[in-house]
Amino acid sequence: MFEFIKKVLVPQNDNFAKHDENLFKLQASVCLLLVDIAKADGSFSTEEK
């Protein structure tokens, strides 16, 4: 699962990523979801950051 997330968050082609608004929205959504999950237990540790 983490490999999939890395593929989503790290674009394979910088030119494509800079111009693709949908890819940016997907990356931002995944980041927000991961932060929300990390904070779910009430503790946001250094490892989770």
Image: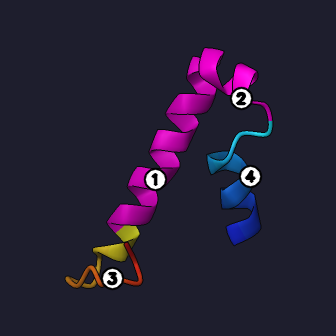
> Given the image, on which type of amino acid does mark 2 rest?
Asp
Out of 49 and 8, give the one closest to the viewer: 49
Q: Is residue 1 visible in this depiction of the protein? A: no
Tell me the residue at 20%/82% (across/down). Answer: 42
Which of the two labelled residues, at mark 1 and mark 4, occupies the earlier sequence position? 4
Which of labels 2 and 4 is toward the front?
2
Q: Which residue is mark 1?
A: 31
Question: Outermost residue toward the top?
Answer: 19
Q: Quadrant of residue 17?
A: top right
Q: CA distance from mark 3 to mark 1?
A: 16 Å
> Given the image, on which type of amino acid does mark 4 rest?
Lys
Please name the predominant secondary structure of the magenta segment in the image: helix
Dot 4 falls on a residue whose secondary structure is: helix
Dot 3 falls on a residue whose secondary structure is: loop
Q: Which residue is mark 4?
A: 7
Which of the two labelled residues, at mark 4 and mark 3, occupies the earlier sequence position? 4
Q: CA distance from mark 2 to mark 4?
A: 13 Å
Q: Which residue is mark 2?
A: 14
Which region is colored magenta?
Answer: 13-36
Q: CA distance from mark 2 to mark 1?
A: 19 Å
Which of labels 4 and 3 is toward the front?
3
Give the number of the disc on residue 48: none
Q: Which residue is mark 3?
A: 46
Q: CA distance from mark 1 to mark 4?
A: 13 Å
> Given the image, on which type of amino acid does mark 1 rest?
Cys
Q: Quadrant of residue 16?
A: top right
Disc tally is 4
Q: Is residue 47 magenta?
A: no
Which of the two labelled residues, at mark 2 and mark 3, occupies the earlier sequence position? 2
Q: Is residue 18 magenta?
A: yes
